Image (cartoon, helix red, strand yellow):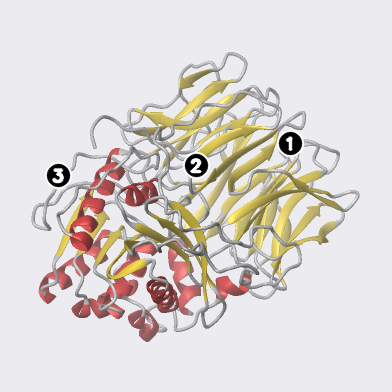
Amino acid sequence: MTGGYRVYRAALPEVCAADPARMVFTADADGRCEVFTWDAVTRRARQVTRRPRGTLHGAIDREAHVWWFDEDAHGRGHWRFQPFAGGPDLPGLSGVPSGLPRGLAVSDHGTVALAVGHGGTTSVHLGPRGGAARTVAHTDGHATLTGITPRGHLLAVGRADGVTVLTSGGTVRAVLPGGDRSGRLWALGFAPAGPDEELLLVRERDDRYVVETWRPGTGTVTHDWCAFDTEITARWDADGRSVLVRQDRHGRSALRRARLDDRTLTTVPTPAGTLLDAATRRGGDLHYLWTDTAHPPRLCSSRGTPLPPLPTVTDPVPGTHRDLWTPGPEGPVHTLLSLPGQPASLTEPTTPTTPALHGPTGPAIPTGPAGATARPGTPAPAPAPAVFLVHGGPADHDRDAYDGVVHSLVASGFAVARVNYRGSTGYGPRWRRASGLGVGLAQVDDLVSVRADLVGRRLIRPDAVGLWGTSWGGYLVLLALGTCPDLWRAGVAVKPVADCAAAYATTTPALRALDERLFGGTPDEVPDRYARSSPIQYVTAVRAPLLVAAATHDAKCPPGQVRGYLAALRAAGVRHEAMWLDSGHDGYDGGDHVAVLRRAVVFLDRELRGPARRPQTPRSTRSGEHRTTERTTERRRSHAEGRHSQRPARG
């Protein structure tokens, strides 16, 4: 690859509530993700931040002050703001200690609330914009500030065990339970208008996701008529009485508008594919971010409002993209399959793309064919070398959405399989809870089943199948290579969990809590479960060559446990390469991503096909981190980055 690149995190611009023409968004700045303003009247953008490592978190308040989070290499820092037209960067609140960003909310009159993480605790602070802060809450564990009322009288703070509503003085106004007994609960913000201080909620209940609301006078109201069989998120409309609901189902998404007063639910027309985000702006203008596998994300406005331009690829996305469903022990496993070339022998499959309100709680096999079928009289395409691109999370899923890594691999002649294994979102609570053989092992079992299905259909070569994953996806790559060594020819693991117990000891409090839920306890309490699911236990069985990329400042998948795994690979004589990044788990600078993308494609090309051809790597629009790279072995370490899921994996 020659020339430059552009990078961004696909996200909907934040819009000023009082002046919808003023927006804040993130975009490329010399290969880094930075915060910009956008004026829809003049159609001009202004760069707000210029940080060596890039900037991801940005917002705009009702008075058009632009907010951004100034963080260090470990993700800790402070919120700052400046006027929309430019000016000095000012502290959001003075007297707040440096920490991890866990929520920012600004009332209509400039009262600022922000939450900051400090190790195993979270503190919530309140004060006038730019003024002195006072601490209104301090809690153990991970908590997130999810909203403030327009008048600044109430705050909502979410935890794994529910939602707490606080007054501006720090008094607990209500405790809304969530968790295993009452069903998980998410707070999605207070109504932006209207006489009531109403909080929007989504609860998982009876294997469905139901919209709820809470008011100080009446308490919680469950809107049973607004229930869905797979994961949803929601936003208030500007009127404060209707809600825009976005549902993820079977790798795709759709919108509905729920009118709370008259209990009606209507479909909002959008193109087939994936809606990465959507929001209704003042005046009824719908903004949404759309994509599918063959098309990079596009910002759309239902009323033609000029929105910021997004960087995109100029070449057409190659290949044929289809769905495939494979029978599994706890239900069919859905795969998004991309095949190289444009084979005339393939027809489009029939797939379950229509979201259901009260359909089956588990994934359903499509009524049509399981995949594309050959037309009579046409030769079948030759099986291709294949890469299983394993998503992270684990509470996430692969979507019918553009992915620069898929683009690069398919352009290089690989088939790409993105498997939504057990535990993935988008298929209902039962599928997400399905555990099978145990943590990680059930997911590997699904990868193995899909591999056998693709080989049986003669779509991929059985002797040329590799794996590539980041974070939790990287963990599954290492686990699959060790537990099923005869099935894989190569693996790429970026920022992985390699030793479950060691990672638990040094990761973030939120991820320790996640591990305790997954394994049913701590490593001291259930050591056998951690050992059984830990890639390092199987390292001597690994046969396929392996490329591992890790980050020296990674708090989520810590570097120490990766170094231990690499040492075990060396002791076992397993052929491998390592790449070390001078970064954290998430990053906003694109050079490292491009470097690892290039190196990983070359590595897989060499291992799965030999040196006969050089891969073609198009410019990528996916975000990552940047430093100079060179090809090295483990003894000559370089700095590069790998694939990020659409949402940062593992927390």
Disc number placed over residue 630 in the picture, else none:
3
- Residue at image mark 2: 295
Image spot of residue 578 (x, y percent): 18, 57
Quarter of the image where the N terminus is located: top left
Between 148 and 415, the residue placed more toward the observer is 415
Disc number placed over residue 160 in the picture, else none:
none
For residue 125, which quarter of the picture?
A: top right
How far is disc 2 from disc 3 in space, using C-alphas? 31 Å
Between 66 and 293, the residue placed more toward the observer is 293
- Binning the other alpha carbons within 10 Å of mark 1 as few (below 14), some (14 to 19) or many (20 upward) gives many
Type of the residue with mark 1: Pro
Q: Which of the marked residues, 2 or 3, is nearer the chain's N terminus?
A: 2
Residue 252 seen: yes
Q: Helix, strand or loop at disc 2?
A: strand
Image spot of residue 240 (x, y percent): 80, 40
Q: Helix, strand or loop at disc 3?
A: loop
Q: Between tags 1 and 3, which lies in front? A: 3
Q: Residue at x 29, y 50 (%)?
A: 412
Type of the residue with mark 3: Glu
Type of the residue with mark 2: His
- Residue at image mark 1: 150
Q: Helix, strand or loop at disc 1?
A: loop
Residue 26 against residue 83 in the figure, above or below = below
